[in-house]
Amino acid sequence: MKLVRFAISFALGTLISRVLGFLRDAGVAYYFGASHISDAFFVAFRIPNSFRRLLGEGGFNAAFVPLYTRAVEEGREKEFLGKVFSFYLLINALVTFLGVVLSEYIVSLLAPGLRGTETLDLAVFMARFLFLYLLLVGLSALFMGVLNVKGRFFVPAVSQGIFNAAFLITLMILSDSYGHVALIVGVIAGGILQVLVYLPSLVSAGVVFRPSLVFDGEVKLLVRRLVPALGGFGVNQLSLFIDTILASFLKTGAISYLYYANRLYQLPFGIVSVGVANSLLSLLSKSGINRNLETTRAFRLVLLLIIPASAGLIILSEEIVRVIYQRGNFSEEDARITATVLSIYSVGLLFSSLQKVLSAEFFSRGDTKTPVKISLISVLSEGVFGFFLAFPLGLGLYGLPLGTALSFLVGFSLLMVKKEVRIERRSLASTLLKSSVASLGMSLLVLWIKSSSEGAVQILALSVPVGALFYFLILFLLREDLALGLFKRFVKKGLNP
């Protein structure tokens, strides 16, 4: 059950980071709402933030973890880290420099609909500073990969929370006096602290970085795996760029609505899907592991947690948005639009989560090309779906998240066709059926709570804990063995801490 233990550790740290992230976003919404300033910031920050996800949430780990694990097992840890650290730092510095120099062209490509507006000028100004965050993201990703191999998942997961906390504090102190400049200072300050938080864990784990400018066969192998791996995760981030590009042709605030909704959608995805995928990658990179069993277990764990999460996000979308964002300059109309976008995003949550987990199995075998090709097809389909739904079919803003949801179905289906691992269909089908039944019961209870309660805070305060307890109660009554195993483990650990 190492997979479950690692995933829980990662999930706990990610949960803390996400909560702080919501507070950060609530701060941006409070001070700037859904305005040209928030649009400009989200465009400018999308690039370095995407690099954070690209590097920190799997792209770098997919190539680095299997090779680093082998180096540790063969007693070559310090030599391997020295080579990788030197090469990786140089590449990150070069990318950061190019980002700063070419920021005007990059922002124009990312939001072509904003050309000739003050929003684009402000986004370019912000981007020139925010690209410095790329260098900090690179170091954070490397430290994350090292600690994951050491079996330490909490600090890497909570490091983003440090960034969020620093950003929020900076925003609260500087926004009234310095306006949008507070957004820039918050990102840089948060990035520095995000890197520093790794140092105690690295020291306690005995990790040493000795720079070595050696570009040998092992480093070349890392590069050969890293390029397609980053390409695959980059393609996933490209989906956000596609939404931004298309949204830039819509009314002011459209980019912000998509950002606010996507952040909420990313909560269960970041906690469950990324946690399970990273844990599965680390586990399958070790020798003597039953790949079929662990991959099936990962699928079942995703089903148990993501199906009720999707139902909850759809049913409670308006209440969630109101509680988190609706205050200050974020209006009731802003909340309504954001909630609708969130509901549509949530339709594709299960397929995006399963795609994430299955990709980790490919990466653990050194196959980084197959997920890349399939991700590219998925993103291209998103662009096609999003364009036709938003413009020719007249759905406008709402067509973009619907196109995203449909593209996840395409990507997951293609990965299932190409997989080599054997999924135990009987146990998977059993978990799917029992989770669906339990989620239906939970949904009916939550709908009843909504109809008999007043106020978004009261509805959420009752629906979330009561709905979760009712969901797991039904699973226990249905004798879902994975859920029962998790419960017994928690009870045993509680009695014998």
Image (cartoon, helix red, strand yellow):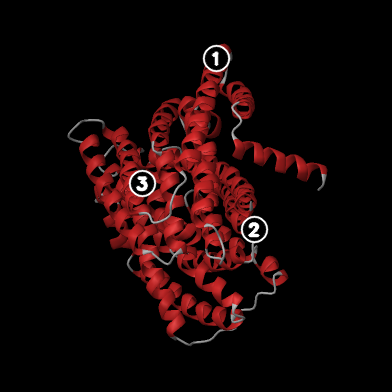
Between 176 and 35, the residue placed more toward the observer is 35
Between tags 3 and 1, which lies in front? 3
Q: Which residue is mark 2?
A: 155
Q: Say the numbered circle drawn on residue 412.
A: 3
Mark 3: give few (<14), some (14-19) or many (20+) Cα within 10 Å: many
Return the x and y of residue 328 as percentages of the image width and height.
52, 33
Q: Is residue 194 visible?
A: yes
Between 140 and 218, the residue placed more toward the observer is 218
Whether tag 3 and tag 1 are in contact, CB under 8 A, the answer is: no
Total of numbered circles in the picture? 3
Between 250 and 363, the residue placed more toward the observer is 363
Q: Which residue is mark 1?
A: 448
Between 434 and 14, the residue placed more toward the observer is 434
Whether tag 2 and tag 1 are in contact, CB under 8 A, the answer is: no
Label 1 is placed on what type of residue?
Trp
How far apart marks 3 and 1 lie (CA) works out to: 34 Å
SS state under label 3: helix
Name which of mark 3 and mark 2 comes first in the sequence.
2
SS state under label 1: helix
SS state under label 2: helix
Q: Say the numbered circle drawn on residue 208.
A: none
Question: Would residue 424 appear left or right of 468 to someone viewing this image?
Answer: left
